Amino acid sequence: MPRGDQDQIMTFQIPEFEKPYQVNIADYLTLLDKKIELNNRINSELEQMSKTIYNYWFVQFDFPNEEGKPYKASGGEIVWNEKLKMEIPVGWTDGKLSEVANITMGQSPDGDSYNEEGKGMVFFQGSTDFNFRFPLVRMFTTAPSRIAHEEDVLLSVRAPVGTLNVANEKCCIDEDLQH
């Protein structure tokens, strides 16, 4: 009980509920558990589907061509890329992410500005805050330094490097992230 007051905990009154009321609560919680389980299965299936599509489009190069047919399987032109040491579709090239996107490094605001009470702007501290697709809000800052905007891709530059999330609101990001 590192944060609890033992004396207060020992005197806490626990309400007694009638058996039918307890059963109703248990039934409701069981329904919630089943819904969570179903959503997790759906998310897992969607993740697998996205991996399959990625494989078809960016490994096998069978993304839809202008006619909606698989590019490579329908005779789409493929050329050798010496730098990548592999064949790629005509018109594709290799390069750096910075050549096709604006990348901004995060910067931590003053430590005294951090809070968990919702004061100021949402603040993400690296991939610690990353979730399935969007980060979880747990920290705020009253002195934001580097700002990411809604729908910006957030990239972790510290362990684990390369982890991605998408900002679902305007936020401050620390030096463990880029956007």
Image (cartoon, rainbow, N blue to C red):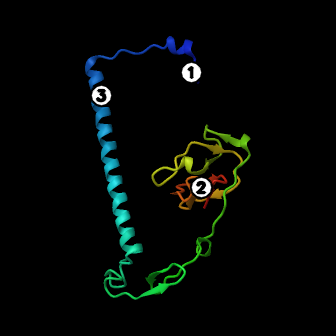
Type of the residue with mark 1: Gly
Type of the residue with mark 3: Ala
Label 3 residue SS? helix
The mark found on residue 32 in the picture is: none
Q: Dot 3: few (<14), some (14–19), or many (≥20) neighbours within 10 Å?
A: few
User: Where residue 62 sits: x, y (%)?
Assistant: 35, 78
Label count reads: 3
Query: Which residue is located at x 49 percent, y 53 percent?
Result: 134
* Disc nearest the viewer among 2 and 1: 1
Where the C terminus falls, by quadrant? bottom right
Q: Which residue is mark 3?
A: 26
Vertical position of residue 1 compared to residue 126: above or below:
above
Q: In the depicted view, which residue is nearer to us: 24 or 98? A: 98
Query: Which residue is located at x 32 percent, y 56 percent?
Result: 45
User: Where residue 3 sits: x, y (%)?
Assistant: 58, 24
Q: Are marks 3 and 1 in contact (CB under 8 Å)?
A: no
* Disc nearest the viewer among 3 and 2: 3
- How far apart marks 3 and 2 lie (CA) works out to 39 Å
Query: Which residue is located at x 74 percent, y 46 percent?
Result: 110
Label 2 residue SS? loop
User: Where residue 117 sits: x, y (%)?
Assistant: 61, 37
- How far apart marks 3 and 1 lie (CA) works out to 27 Å
Q: In the depicted view, which residue is nearer to us: 141 or 119? A: 141
Tag 1 or tag 2, which sits nearer the N-term?
1
Vertical position of residue 21 compared to residue 58: above or below:
above
Type of the residue with mark 2: Lys
Vertical position of residue 144 compared to residue 49: above or below:
above
Q: Which residue is mark 2?
A: 170
* Disc nearest the viewer among 3 and 1: 1
Q: Which residue is mark 1?
A: 4
Tag 1 or tag 3, which sits nearer the N-term?
1
Where the N terminus falls, by quadrant? top right
